[in-house]
Amino acid sequence: MNRYRMRFAPQVWTPKLNATLVKWLRPLRIRQQYREVRIDTVDVAGQHHLRHALDQGDGVMIMPNHSSHADPYVIYSAADDVGTPLHVMATWHVFHGKSRVVQWALQRHGCFSVDREANDIRAFRLATEILRDERAPLVIFPEGEIYHCNERVTPFREGAAAIAVAAARKAKRKIVCIPCAMTYRYEEDPSPMLLSTMGELEEAIFWRRQDDKPLDERIYRFAEALLAVKELEYFEVTKNGPLPDRIRALSDRILSQVEQRHALDGSASSIPERVKAARREIITKRDAAEETGQSTDSLDHDLEDLFLVVQSFSYPGDYVVEKPTIERLAETLDKFEEDVLKRMTATIKAKRRAKVQLGEPIEVIGDKKIKGQTSMLTSQVEASVQAMLDHA
């Protein structure tokens, strides 16, 4: 998982979509898509769902899974196939530190920033305005993070659905959400690169390379070793039991301790939402401490703990053993490469092919009398995306 600075956004980037420029730059996007993420073909299914919604003049939100750094290229390739540009909500880290040329290009492709650590009302209002008034669809990734689990969604956060519901309450046109499933398959054998990466990981924890063992066994032995180290750190003993249970217990232990230190009650929320609430509180305290010249060491340690919780959450513990395909092996090694070897993004192991499946639009009813609509819409879209992934 990418390591990014946990702080409030230093500035705002707004969308400046230029449909003509988007069309002209398509050949460049295709070249960059292969150069950066080794995808030369994107197959698109269900285009008629999106085309029909656009032809009717509906406000459209596309809600895809988010398993890969290649996702922005792939979703835009699908939009090219349909013949529409996009608006894309992205974390401010996508813009920060980039050259002005890159920032300019992102904005002309309809990208705009959101501060995920704050209650970003500005981004919320902008997104609802796009849904109410603009022809180009709005893309929001409800998972929030890249979890490298291509065949299994992590719980969708409710922010995207909340934007759709808010837009529907004020819009003069129909608002629809289109579930979107993106999958990746290798067209070349990535095994040599996977074995090389596995060896680097084993050496990083002072093991000899376990070349005599199957790759899936090496992955689980390595995961057990990492988990045992963290259990010793936080529990002072190693635990027994199935890997998924131990991962959940460690995450809950760390998160509960952080919440106790800051008098936060996260008992009713999902782990990502609990982490978000804790980060917001700690970043606010950290900014105040910096202004008064106080030490921020303990707050920085809490932010590191929260990052570990998110990292742990991205490892289901049974993903490879459930179906030890080459793609699942590679995704798990990609996570290890970013988390253990601390690479900004995992190396691309071989040429891949992507598939985008656009599902049936789900109309959003803007009726304030309907209770729990945001949660119901989130669950409905999440289930639709998972169903498409199951049949990909």
Image (cartoon, rainbow, N blue to C red):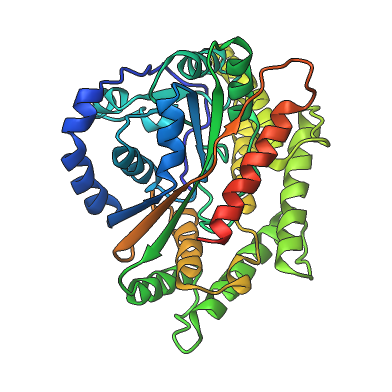
Residue 47 in percent (x, y) is at: 40, 43
**Residue 384 shown left or right of residue 185 in the figure:** right
**Residue 311 in sight in this render:** no
Residue 296 in percent (x, y) is at: 59, 27
Res 81 → quadrant: top left
Identify which residue, 130 or 276, lies in the foreground. Answer: 130
Residue that lies at the very extreme toward the bottom in this rendered image: 212
**Residue 27 in sight in this render:** yes
Q: Is residue 112 above or below residue 28?
A: above
Q: Could you tell me which residue is drawn at 70 percent across and 28 percent down?
A: 374
Res 183 → quadrant: bottom left
Q: Is residue 359 above or below residue 349?
A: above
The image shows a total of numbered marks equal to 0
Q: Is residue 155 above or below residue 34?
A: above
**Residue 234 shown left or right of residue 167 in the figure:** right
Residue 193 in percent (x, y) is at: 34, 71
Identify which residue, 104 or 224, lies in the foreground. Answer: 104
Q: Could you tell me which residue is drawn at 31 percent across and 43 percent down?
A: 77
Identify which residue, 208 or 61, lies in the foreground. Answer: 61
Q: Could you tell me which residue is drawn at 68 percent across and 66 percent down?
A: 228
Residue 84 in percent (x, y) is at: 32, 31
Res 196 → quadrant: bottom left
